[in-house]
Image (spheres, grey):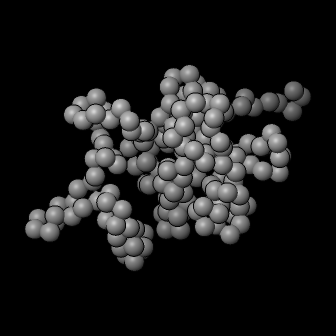
Amino acid sequence: MSRNKFAEFYKRLEREGILTEDAETKDIFMNASVIYRGDIKQIGADISDLEYTRVFRSTVRRLYEEFDGKQLTQLGLIYSVLPFINVQSNTIAFNPEERDMERIRPMTLRHLAMTLEYENPQKLKTAMNAVKVDGRPAFLFYEDADNRREKRTVVNPKVVFGGNGEALAHVNLMFKQAPQTGANN
């Protein structure tokens, strides 16, 4: 990552209150209300009204090591979509905080592109398709049942997941590799 891009990113994290730097010691601290490492039950505060999701450090570290230069922009897509992931379904949604599965409103790829300031939804999809986790896609796209030209997005649970075991099994099934078939099958 270039020095200028890093400086821009770092300043944005400071502006958003995600990172703070101690002026005296130059130590950098992450805001615990945004990012918490460890057993969530040990946080020592009432968090019952907060939404949270799990991000797997080993996966993020492995992805970072796999990507370099221009590809870091593609990896940044994972971080860009985090605020829009409904933690119950791993679907990118207009209402990511919704807990009732019947009321989740999946966001179309077109709307996601507009939100992330991509001019062309197809270019966003191409960039998202380039992101892999353990050789599998980080994102899957499915058709909107009411408008088959519109696509919706699900995030691989190996990247991030916040739902229950039943939802995890469902999302994992979507990302499971289909068995290969022979020429005669």
**Quick one: quadrant of the N terminus?**
bottom left
Whether residue 156 is visible to the viewer of this picture, yes or no, is no
Residue at the spot 78% in from the left edge and 50% down from the top edge: 150
For the image shown, how many numbered marks are present on the structure?
Answer: 0
Quadrant of the rendered image containing residue 103: top right
User: Residue 159: horizontal and vertical position, in percent?
Assistant: 50, 42
Residue 31 on image: x %, y %: 28, 52
In the rendered image, which quarter contains the C terminus?
Answer: top right
Q: Which residue does the image show at 87% across and 33% down from the upper left?
A: 183
Q: Looking at the picture, tell me which residue is in the foreground, 46 or 29.
A: 46
Left or right: where 63 falls relative to 122: left
Q: Is residue 52 visible?
A: yes
Work out which residue is located at the far top of the displayed protein and give it. Answer: 166
Closer to the camera, 140 or 105? 105
Q: Position of residue 14 (x, y in %)?
A: 31, 65
- From what the image shows, is residue 165 above or below residue 34? above
